[in-house]
Image (cartoon, rainbow, N blue to C red):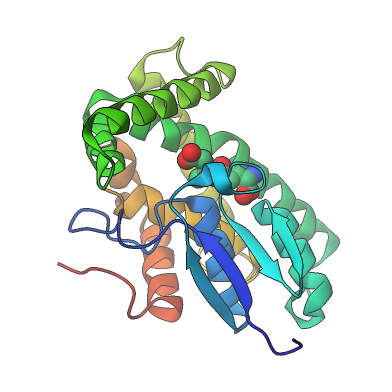
């Protein structure tokens, strides 16, 4: 029991990673947790489930470890900190820990809305997302399930006040988030210098999704033009996923 790997239950690579999804996971939260596990060399086993309705909070990821099931990426990380204390960011200053919290909130509470918009509301993104989501589902039932999914995400977007403004304004909000991240990253390899921390795993989950998913948004160009963000994504990809990406 003691040496059992952590079971990480999340979306599979396969259904989203085709020629147009050049990243290991189309969910920023799943990619965050998997990157954290790899960053700290915690042994894990991937359990693929493409149906979040079966997850404890109807969302992915969740983990099973030593008879316990933990949902929500941040609760998972905090649980793993207890199990593997060497993974804690206790080398960060109080100020850096406060910045970690603030920037994590920026991504997990705000930037996530922009990503959801690009996939479920922007007509160009929705055409791609719809096709990806329908893959493997029976035709009529599939359209029904995907329609419900889109409605649910639109409710979330309404709560984020993203449905009342123009598409340009939505992406402008995303650009502002990216600008903050670029300023904070500065010219160091990771957010807090030469050593990666939780914030790097979170940022990679979000930035890699914006940069390497197939949605044709202006935000890709913004990341490419903020050279430090692009270099960061490539550095993280080379360090933690040298063999899990589709390449051109
Ligand atoms: N607070 C959760 C959010 C997880 C989340 O929103 N997961 C999304 C994927 S990015 C999900 O499973 N959504 C349900 C769906 O796609 O039907 C966490 O940090 O893990």
Quadrant in the picture for the C terminus: bottom left
Q: Is residue 160 visible?
A: yes
Residue 110: quadrant of the picture:
top right
Residue 21: quadrant of the picture:
bottom left
Residue closest to the far left? 248
- Does residue 28 lie above or below 198 as drawn? above
Residue at position x 85%, y 60% in the image? 94
Left of 135 or right of it: where is 12?
A: right
Left of 119 or right of it: where is 38?
A: right
- Does residue 233 lie above or below 224 as drawn? below
Residue closest to the far top? 164
In the image, residue 162 lies at what x, y percent?
48, 19
Q: Nearer the viewer, residue 57 or 236?
A: 57
In the image, residue 35 lies at what x, y percent?
53, 69
Q: Nearer the viewer, residue 23 or 132?
A: 132
Q: Nearer the viewer, residue 49 or 232?
A: 49
In the image, residue 129 lies at what x, y percent?
29, 38
Residue at position x 27%, y 60% in the image? 22
Residue at position x 78%, y 65% in the image? 79
Number of marks: 0
């Amino acid at each position: 029991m003691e040496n059992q790997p952590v079971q990480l239950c999340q979306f599979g690579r396969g259904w989203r990673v085709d020629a147009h999804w050049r990243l290991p996971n189309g969910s920023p939260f799943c990619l965050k947790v998997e990157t954290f596990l790899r960053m700290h060399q915690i042994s894990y086993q991937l359990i693929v489930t493409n149906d979040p309705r079966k997850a404890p909070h109807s969302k992915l990821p969740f983990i099973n470890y030593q008879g316990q099931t933990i949902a929500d990426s941040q609760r998972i990380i905090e649980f793993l900190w207890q199990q593997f204390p060497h993974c804690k960011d206790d080398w960060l200053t109080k100020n850096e820990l406060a910045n970690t919290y603030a920037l994590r909130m920026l991504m997990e509470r705000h930037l996530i809305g922009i990503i959801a918009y690009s996939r479920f509301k922007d007509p160009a993104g929705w055409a791609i997302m719809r096709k990806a989501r329908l893959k493997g589902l029976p035709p009529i039932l599939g359209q029904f399930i995907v329609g419900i999914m889109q409605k649910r995400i639109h409710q979330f977007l309404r709560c984020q006040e993203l449905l009342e403004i123009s598409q340009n304004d939505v992406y402008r909000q995303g650009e502002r988030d990216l600008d903050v991240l670029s300023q904070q990253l500065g010219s160091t390899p990771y957010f807090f210098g030469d050593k990666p921390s939780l914030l790097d795993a979170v940022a990679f989950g979000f930035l890699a999704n914006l940069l390497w998913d197939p949605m044709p948004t202006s935000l890709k160009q913004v990341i490419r033009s903020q050279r430090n963000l692009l270099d960061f994504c490539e550095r993280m990809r080379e360090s933690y996923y040298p063999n899990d990406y589709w390449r051109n």
